[in-house]
Amino acid sequence: MTSTQNSPQARVLIAGAGPVGLLTALELARRGVAVRLVDAADGPAVTSRAMATHARSLEQYDQQGLLPDLLPRGRVIQRFTMHLNGRRLAALGPDYSRVPTRHPMTLMIDQAATEDVLRQAVAKHGVEIEWGVRLTGFEQRDDGVSVELTGPAGPERADAGWLVGCDGGHSTVRRLLGLPLIGDSTETWLIADAEIETELPQNSIHWIKVGSGTVMAIPFPQEGKWRLLDTADTSYAGEPADVAERFADKLRRGLGRPVTVHRPSWVSVFTIQQRMVPAMRSGRCLLAGDAAHVHSPASGQGLNTGLQDAYNLAWKLALVEQGHARDALLDSYSAERVPVGRALLGSTRKATWLVQLRNSTAGAALPVVFALVRAFAPLRGRIERKIIGSMSALSLEYPDSPLTLPDHRPAGAAGPRAGSRLAQVTADRAAGPGWSALLDELRDLRPSLLVTAGPDGAVRAAGAARAAHQGWLSVRTVGGDGPDALPDPDGALRADLGLPPGGWLLVRPDGYLCGRGEVLTPAGLAEALDVLRGVRPAAREV
């Protein structure tokens, strides 16, 4: 067995070069952490399991500077159209009024295209993917992990400070850790990717009730190509042409129009797994994405949740590795993300039931229900807001995290609450000078302390923080003067953020708000920075 002990040591070894592993590697490499990225496959995947990229992930890509590369390769979706036996029941649009964002849409982009963009990004930061290298074992020590690998050059033993398992639903890292994947298997569905000839608007996802089951048609970015999903007739004897004809027949009946489905390029029968791990950290090993939670694809959450796992983890791991934070900071990763996985099991289970809707009584009631939806705008708005709030991940908050300071302001007070995402702003308002400057600030790799000009004590506390922590903390004066000022000439940013003179916000690198206060003081700042760095958890009121 060869050894790499005398070679430059990667501080983080990542198993799995899918989108979650790639994003984890990118965020660590951008922060100067040495990364090794291995994958058991011979090369990149050519089929696309995931397609939907929701608004919160688009905000995240914007922070990382990746959005300009991704948008041209996708298709914007802002409709969900429902059909029943040849009739169009309703076309629901997105309602982001309760969760404002600069990216009010879902982007349909092939997972293969997403991975291509991420591979190019990690390559620019010097990360080379090692294909055909399989992790076969590891041992943890107090100061690192000794990993056993098998690749084209034979077996190898390597050392790393940390091991991150992004190796999918059959994760080797999870299995070797002995972490159970708790949950169950539910429905079996059939998926086919094919070109279709029909006059079906490709700016919408289409839900089609036909007979006792349902079919979904999800547009690819490529003109005329669709992903088709059958929730009832899932038999497949290995002949794609038979699947094409079966889908064509159902689509003709469900849409009430001529349809031709060409031979699919990919067909898959899969059983939906609804499972999760009880913890996403075990010592110096961490799990992200499908390695930690698998669930129904009904609302397109898998890829998005995995990307947000990676973003949540990477900045924390970098701060710890670089000596700016305590090891305990990494406990917040599991504390924050395990509840997300648990909630997704519930929401995707409901979405699965709604997608397949096998209840005949419910199917018969659909025309009446959607006649009411069309007639009463308030009811329609409630449905659209409910769908967007859960699907987009924009309403996700961490109010009970050990990294979130209590927010004592009254309900309804201006500005984001501690634990919520900071950039709750529409594209139009984000074009103003204050918001534009803040969005640029959020692209900084460090946490941000934002302080408004005010009492001398607050100014001195901000200056002291800048002098003491500038290596890992960005300190900006909102609406002030000087080289570290964040311009806000019309005061719109301070109003939207609910910042009084001397007020402050401490923002995590992933864009969530760690804490806020009315007037910055040395004691208040010391507590906030200790919480952010894992020195002590945020105090909770009993």
Image (cartoon, helix red, strand yellow):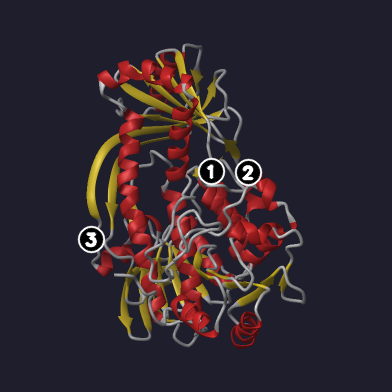
**Relative to 292, does residue 445 appear above or below in the rendering?**
below
Q: Alpha-carbon distance for marks 2 and 1?
A: 8 Å
As measured in the structure, the alpha-carbon distance from the residue carrying label 3 to the one carrying label 1 is 31 Å
Residue at 60 percent of width and 38 percent of height: 75
Q: Are marks 2 and 1 in contact (CB under 8 Å)?
A: yes
Question: Are there few (<14), some (14-19), or many (20+) residues within 10 Å of tag 1?
Answer: many
Question: Up-down: is 31 above or below 428?
Answer: below
Q: Nearer the viewer, mark 3 or mark 1?
A: 3
**Residue nearest the viewer, comparing 488 with 294:** 488
Disc 2 crowd, CA 10 A, few/some/many (<14, 14-19, 20+): some
Q: Which residue in the protein does label 1 denote?
A: 110
Q: Quadrant of residue 141?
A: bottom left
Using the image as rendered, state which of residue 437 and residue 334 is in the foreground.
437
**Amino acid beneath label 2:** Arg
In the rendered image, which residue does mark 3 sit on?
Answer: 180
Q: Position of residue 95 (x, y in %)?
A: 53, 37
In the rendered image, residue 517, in percent from the top left (x then y), is placed at: 53, 71
Report helix, strand or loop for mark 2. Answer: helix
Q: Secondary structure at mark 1?
A: loop
Quarter placement of the N terminus = bottom left
* Of 174 and 379, the residue lying toward us: 379
Q: Residue at x 48, y 56 (%)?
A: 307
Total marks drawn?
Answer: 3
Locate residue 207, reporting x and y percent: 43, 26
Amino acid tagged 1: Asp
User: Label 1 near label 3: C-beta < 8 Å?
Assistant: no
Q: Position of residue 357 (x, y in %)?
A: 31, 27
Q: Earlier in the sequence, mark 2 or mark 3?
A: 2
First in residue order: circle 2 vs circle 1 = 2
Asked where in the image residue 152 lies, by quadrant, the reply is: bottom left
Report the residue marked by disc 2.
73
Whether residue 155 is visible to the viewer of this picture, yes or no, is no
